[in-house]
Structure formats: structure tokens, C-alpha cells
Image (cartoon, rainbow, N blue to C red):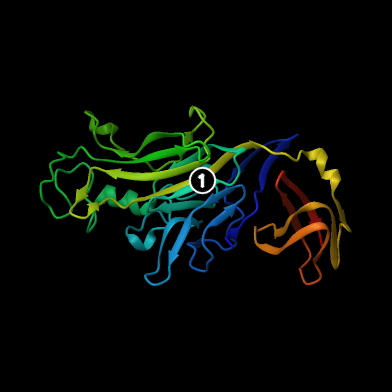
């Protein structure tokens, strides 16, 4: 089972839904990160899934990690979890860091990804700004070893944002530069240290998967020398679901507030309960009537979600 988190920003109008994954409830401690090392694989922000794999033998992650690290001045691989902007988008605290052909996708054909915010990581940004043992200093005609590299200092670092509809195989792509030193006027050269929005509304189909591929002018014997990292925040999605708000009347969920056992009555589905930090605290199969034990949970607000083949119903539960 994946790491499960709760969406805190959502708007439901009838059967139409729009929501934003802002990662803010994903971490409880400051200046930390979740790279999947404690398992299991993947980050579940239903209906959006972020791909993650952690190699326990060599202690590295691929795909996505979740971070609230603010250090944007320390160079090098040991600071790989920091955004170059020093925070998340809109000065928020938490965001995602991605590397090694990252991707995220929807779990429902009815859901489309409409936009997300993007920025450099500190690791990549400072490597391009000052150079390091592997990556060159952008704007210079030489590589990290001091050899003429043929670029004449006209360097760039960009991502290809590959959009797919997994149902019918449609594909399109967007090219976005995280750094560009190819301008005739050197004062226009830049390494992105702000957050920018990638708008997918111009894509001609429903975007159900986004993959990111890296490209740099700094190429060596073993491939790209620029650190292949990017920061992501505020993934927006919208969709139409089979269960509208009025269909919540099909379920009887009681007592609420609850002290010991919560009873759920209604159509079959999968029941999950998360706390406000997004941690999964209970999960079970539901069929007509089921119960959830709250007796050992601390007092607070919990989010109960019932997933069915036709959609989902969500209720706030008070202990």
C-alpha cells in the first residue's frame, strides 16, 4: 500500500470536482523530507498518484520526494531536497522534489490534471550558477574539467513535460526552460529561482499522466552533467464523479461525534480514515454495514472516505 495523504483544498459542486494538491499536510516536522525510505512505494493523493521508489541497498530515491527544507544556499548532492526559491509556491512550506524520469498520474478516467507549479532545486540551481565537480558553470565556454566544451557559454537546462491520456494513448508535450544562457544580451540569461505555473488547459485531451524528462547543454561521457532535479507544487485537477453530494444521503454514518465504534451503513465500497496530517489510521472493506474502531485514537477531527466503483463520499468525523 502507498503512503496515503488527504487533500485539504477541494471544491465539490454537484458531481463536478476541482482540487489542488499543495502538500501542506504531508510533513509534521520542519526542515525534513520523505523520500520513501520508510516505505511503502508511492505517494497517494487520491485521485493523483506520485511515483516513488527508494533503493534500500544504495540509499537513493527516484521519482518524487516530499520536502519542506528551506536551505537554498548550500551546494551539492547533500542538499538535494531543497527548492531554489527557499520555499514552496506562494511561500508555502511544503512541496515535492523530483528526479530520474519522474511522473504522476490519475487513478480515474474522469479526472484530468490541469496545471502545476515548477521551479529549480537548490542542488541544480547552484550547480549551474557556480559549477561543481561534475556540472559546468553556465555561461562559461568550458566544462567542469576546464576543457572547451563547444557551447561557447550558450547553456540551457530544460524539462520536457510529456502529457498523456492513458485511455486512448494520446500524447503531447510542453518544453520549459529552468535555465537559459542563450540570449544575445547576457543580462537576460537566467537560472529560475521562482515558481512558475505550467498550464495544461491548452492540451487537446484529458491529461491523465504527466512525465518529466530532463535535457541540458552540459553533456559528458555518461550523459547529462547538470543535476537532473526539479521542484513541483500545487498540482491542480478536476473531474466528474458518479456520486454527487446529494448521494451522500445513501449512507448512514453514526454516531458523530464518536467515542468508541463508528458505524457505516450504505452501498459497498472501501472505507479509509485519515487524520488531518494525512496519515492513514484505519482501512477496511465495507459491505452494507461495517464498523470502525475509534476507541484507541486520540481526540480530534478525522476524514472518513468511502470509495466505490461510482465515485466517493467523504465525511468529517469528530472524536
Q: Residue at x 57, y 51 (%)?
A: 23
Above or below residue 191? Residue 200 is: above
> Position of 99 compared to 135: left or right?
right
Q: Residue furthest left?
A: 148
In terms of image quadrants, where is residue 9? top right
> Position of 254 compared to 77: left or right?
right
> Position of 235 compared to 255: left or right?
left
Q: Position of residue 192 (x, y in %)?
A: 37, 41
Q: Position of residue 22 (x, y in %)?
A: 57, 47
Q: Position of residue 146 (x, y in %)?
A: 12, 52
> Position of 31 compared to 222: left or right?
right
Q: Residue at x 10, y 46 (%)?
A: 148
Residue located beneath label 1 in the image: 233
Q: How many marks?
A: 1
- Where disc 1 sits, the SS reads strand
Q: Residue at x 51, y 56 (%)?
A: 66
Query: 180 or 279: which is nearer to us?
Result: 279
Query: 60 or 272: which is nearer to us?
Result: 272
Q: Residue at x 74, y 52 (%)?
A: 306
Quadrant containing the N terminus in the rendered view: bottom right
Mark 1 Cα within 10 Å, few/some/many (few <14, many 20+)?
many
Q: Position of residue 157 (x, y in %)?
A: 30, 42
In terms of image quadrants, where is residue 221? bottom left
Above or below residue 305? Residue 235 is: above
Query: 200 or 32: which is nearer to us?
Result: 200
Q: Residue furthest front?
A: 168
Quadrant containing the C terminus in the rendered view: bottom right
Amino acid at each position: 500500500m502507498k503512503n496515503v495523504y488527504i487533500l485539504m483544498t477541494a471544491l465539490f459542486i454537484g458531481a463536478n470536482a476541482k482540487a489542488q494538491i499543495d502538500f501542506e499536510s504531508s510533513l509534521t516536522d520542519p526542515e525534513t523530507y520523505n523520500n520513501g525510505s520508510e516505505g511503502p512505494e508511492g505517494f497517494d493523493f487520491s485521485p493523483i498518484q506520485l511515483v516513488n521508489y527508494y533503493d534500500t541497498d544504495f540509499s537513493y530515491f527516484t521519482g518524487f520526494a516530499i520536502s519542506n527544507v528551506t536551505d537554498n544556499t548550500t551546494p551539492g548532492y547533500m542538499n538535494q531536497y531543497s527548492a531554489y526559491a527557499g520555499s514552496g509556491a506562494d511561500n508555502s512550506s511544503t512541496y515535492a522534489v523530483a528526479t530520474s524520469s519522474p511522473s504522476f498520474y490519475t487513478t480515474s478516467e474522469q479526472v484530468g490534471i490541469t496545471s502545476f507549479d515548477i521551479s529549480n532545486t537548490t542542488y541544480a540551481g547552484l550547480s549551474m550558477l557556480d559549477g561543481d565537480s561534475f556540472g559546468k558553470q553556465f555561461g562559461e565556454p568550458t566544462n567542469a574539467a576546464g576543457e572547451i566544451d563547444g557551447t561557447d557559454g550558450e547553456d540551457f537546462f530544460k524539462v520536457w513535460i510529456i502529457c498523456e491520456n492513458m485511455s486512448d494513448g494520446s500524447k503531447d508535450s510542453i518544453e520549459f526552460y529552468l535555465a537559459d544562457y542563450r540570449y544575445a544580451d547576457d543580462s537576460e540569461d537566467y537560472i529560475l529561482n521562482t515558481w512558475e505555473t505550467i498550464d495544461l488547459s491548452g492540451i487537446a485531451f484529458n491529461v491523465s499522466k504527466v512525465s518529466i524528462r530532463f535535457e541540458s547543454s552540459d553533456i559528458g561521457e555518461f550523459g547529462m552533467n547538470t543535476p537532473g532535479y526539479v521542484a513541483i507544487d500545487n498540482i491542480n485537477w478536476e473531474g466528474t464523479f458518479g456520486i454527487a453530494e446529494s448521494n451522500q444521503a445513501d449512507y448512514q454514518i453514526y454516531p458523530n461525534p464518536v467515542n468508541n465504534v463508528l458505524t457505516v451503513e450504505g452501498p459497498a465500497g472501501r472505507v479509509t480514515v485519515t487524520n488531518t496530517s494525512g496519515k492513514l489510521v484505519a482501512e477496511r472493506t465495507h459491505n452494507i454495514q461495517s464498523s470502525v474502531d475509534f476507541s484507541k485514537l486520540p481526540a480530534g477531527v478525522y476524514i472518513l472516505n468511502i470509495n466505490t466503483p461510482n465515485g466517493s463520499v467523504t465525511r468529517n468525523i469528530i472524536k
